[in-house]
Image (spheres, rainbow, N blue to C red):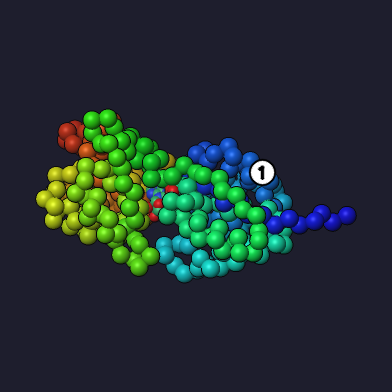
Amino acid sequence: MMNEIRPRVTLVGAGPGDPELITLKGVLALNKADVVLYDALIDRALLNHAPDKAIKVFVGKRHGSRQHPQEDTNKQCVYYAQKYGHVVRLKGGDPFVFGRGAEELDYIQQFGIATDVVPGISSTVAVPASAGIPVTKRGVSESYWVITGTTSSGALSDDLKLASRSKATVVLLMGTRKLDEIVGVYEDEGLSDKAIAIIERGTTREERVVAGTITNIQKKARESKIGAPAIIIIGEVVKESPQLKAIFEELVCDHKMIS
Ligand code: SAH
């Protein structure tokens, strides 16, 4: 006897990279998936939480290529849900932090398909933490600001100017290609001594970290060829990292450090 197909989509935050940093609720959703649609930044080990017979589909965009445009992903979610039942849409970090999660839900809901969201540990806090950087610390930083380096028009967000004038820790996503512009914003404010770190593939085995000041970070980034996916974190909290302290004290560096 055929089971009736009940289409539903669960948007699951996969966490920042380390496959152990998904939530228990996320794992339980995967356990019950008929189909998993996953992004480029997802560790394939997470797919082992889905049943063997579940269909696994890669829908990621690699380095901004138009290989899998967003519209296709939306359509695939609907197609697979209607055909097979429970779709788990696995997205990096938290689905609602620059992940287009809300847009995907809007689209899917138009078809009367039931949806659910499982939050994830966002790279915005977990990646700095992996490099020993607390986004807030009593007496050092009382707020943090998460900003995109690449808005829908491709430009660096204007919010960076405002943030740079505040005492907030600034966490920039999708910003490595805009490093010169970012440095320019801080230089214009006379903040060349501000501490800054770039963390590539944070929480994974390939994690690399470069840290310095606004003045020397471009050179360090160039020399190390550090690049996407990476998070840029700017503020005095960078100096609070036990791993990075040495750089600011010009002492010996940790083995993970490349400069
Ligand atoms: N929803 C995600 C962010 C999606 S935007 C979240 O909450 O984490 C994708 C950007 O996030 C990347 O370009 C990069 O800037 C950042 N990012 C995600 N995972 C990362 C990681 N492990 N290390 C460094 N940066 C990461």
Q: In the displayed structure, does residue 182 sit left or right of residue 58?
A: left
Residue in front for this viewpoint, 257 or 202 = 202
Is the CB of mark 1 within 8 Å of ligand 1?
Answer: no
Q: In the displayed structure, does residue 211 sit left or right of residue 82?
A: left
- Taking the view exactly as shown, the residue that stands out farthest to the right is 1
Which residue is depicted at the point 56% across and 63% down? 107
- Taking the view exactly as shown, the residue that stands out farthest to the left is 190
Residue 48 horizontal/vertical position (percent): 62, 45
Examine the rendered structure and indicate whether residue 230 appears above or below residue 69.
above
Q: Is residue 55 visible?
A: no
Which residue is depicted at the point 55% across and 45% down? 118
Per the image, label 1 sits on a secondary structure element best described as: helix
Q: Can you tell which quarter of the image residue 110 is in? A: bottom right
The amino acid marked with disc number 1 is Asn
Q: In the displayed structure, does residue 43 sit left or right of residue 225?
A: right
- Mark 1 Cα within 10 Å, few/some/many (few <14, many 20+)? some
Q: Is residue 13 visible?
A: yes
| Quarter of the figure that contains the N terminus | bottom right
Examine the rendered structure and indicate whether residue 67 appears above or below residue 143.
below
Residue 183 horizontal/vertical position (percent): 20, 54
Which residue is depicted at the point 52% across and 38% down? 20
Residue 159 horizontal/vertical position (percent): 27, 55
Which residue is depicted at the point 34% across and 49% down? 146
Q: In the displayed structure, does residue 206 sit left or right of residue 48?
A: left
Please tell me how many numbered marks the rendered image carries: 1
Residue annotated with mark 1: 31
Residue in front for this viewpoint, 220 or 23 = 23
Residue 5 horizontal/vertical position (percent): 76, 57
Q: Can you tell which quarter of the image residue 158 is in? A: bottom left
| Quarter of the figure that contains the C terminus | top left
